[in-house]
Image (tube, helix red, strand yellow):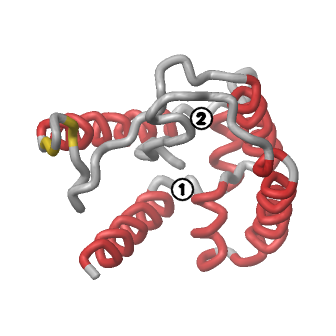
């Protein structure tokens, strides 16, 4: 139960932060991404603040040790990607994510928040996102991983924005 409560509170704080920062407003996000036009740099401060908080949290978590490794609040060890894990699927996924974010002004976190705040905006994006996830699971998701090592395929998510 504590893990569920921690996840709920974390999600709630994240969602409120997205609303306060206006990252759920596609026009605001597109203004940030339009670096050659009417650029709005305000979201850079949001991302910078998120990175600062994350840096402190990771540092604290790494000091908590179990078997010589940092631990999360629930006692699980921190899982980090193996070194040299940049490959074609990662780059391709990043490009697709960036294209979608740039075309629509939404990414998964803000889109989920929009489902409760501005349902009309999320009504188009969320089904497309689910379709993409299903397409991935039926194609790329079934292929065996090529990376090896103790942390192959694991990623710790603690990023800014999403």
Across and down, in percent, residue 84 comes to: 54, 17
Task: Name the element at disc 2.
Answer: loop
Name the residue that disc number 1 marks. 22
Across and down, in percent, residue 75 comes to: 21, 57
- Give the residue at x 54% y 32%: 41
* Residue positioned most to the top: 84
Across and down, in percent, residue 110 comes to: 60, 60
Name the residue that disc number 2 marks. 40
Task: Name the element at disc 1.
Answer: loop
Residue 8 is left or right of residue 134, and the answer is: left
Residue 48 is left or right of residue 6, and the answer is: right
Q: How many marks?
A: 2
Near mark 2 (Cα within 10 A), the count class, few <14, some 14-19 or many ≥20, is some
Residue 50 is left or right of residue 161, and the answer is: left
Residue 134 is left or right of residue 52, and the answer is: right
Q: Is residue 120 above or below residue 57?
A: below
- Give the residue at x 76% y 50%: 141
The quarter of the picture where residue 69 lies is top left
- Eye-nearest disc, 1 or 2: 1
Instruction: Give the numbered dot on residue 102.
Output: none
The quarter of the picture where residue 73 lies is bottom left
Across and down, in percent, residue 17 comes to: 41, 59
- Give the residue at x 30% y 72%: 3
Distance from Cα at disc 1 to Cα at disc 2? 12 Å
- Give the residue at x 26% y 38%: 58
The one nearer the camera, 27 or 136, is 136
| Quadrant of the rendering where the N terminus is positioned | bottom left
The quarter of the picture where residue 53 lies is top left
Q: Is residue 53 above or below residue 115?
A: above
Near mark 1 (Cα within 10 A), the count class, few <14, some 14-19 or many ≥20, is some
Q: Is residue 40 above or below residue 103?
A: above
Indicate which disc, 1 or 2, sits on the residue closer to the N terminus: 1
């Amino acid at each position: 139960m504590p893990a569920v409560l921690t996840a709920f509170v974390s999600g709630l704080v994240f969602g409120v932060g997205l609303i306060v920062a206006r990252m759920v407003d596609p026009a605001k996000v597109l203004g940030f991404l339009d670096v050659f036009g009417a650029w709005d740099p305000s979201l850079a401060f949001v991302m910078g603040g998120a990175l600062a908080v994350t840096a402190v949290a990771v540092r604290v978590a790494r000091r908590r040790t179990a078997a010589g490794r940092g631990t999360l609040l629930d006692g699980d060890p921190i899982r980090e990607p193996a070194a040299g894990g940049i490959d074609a699927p990662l780059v391709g996924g990043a490009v697709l994510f960036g294209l979608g974010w740039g075309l629509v002004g939404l990414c998964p976190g803000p889109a989920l928040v929009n489902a409760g705040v501005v349902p009309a905006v999320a009504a188009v994006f969320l089904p497309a996102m689910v379709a993409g996830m299903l397409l991935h699971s039926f194609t790329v998701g079934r292929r065996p991983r090529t990376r090896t090592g103790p942390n192959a395929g694991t990623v710790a998510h603690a990023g800014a924005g999403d």
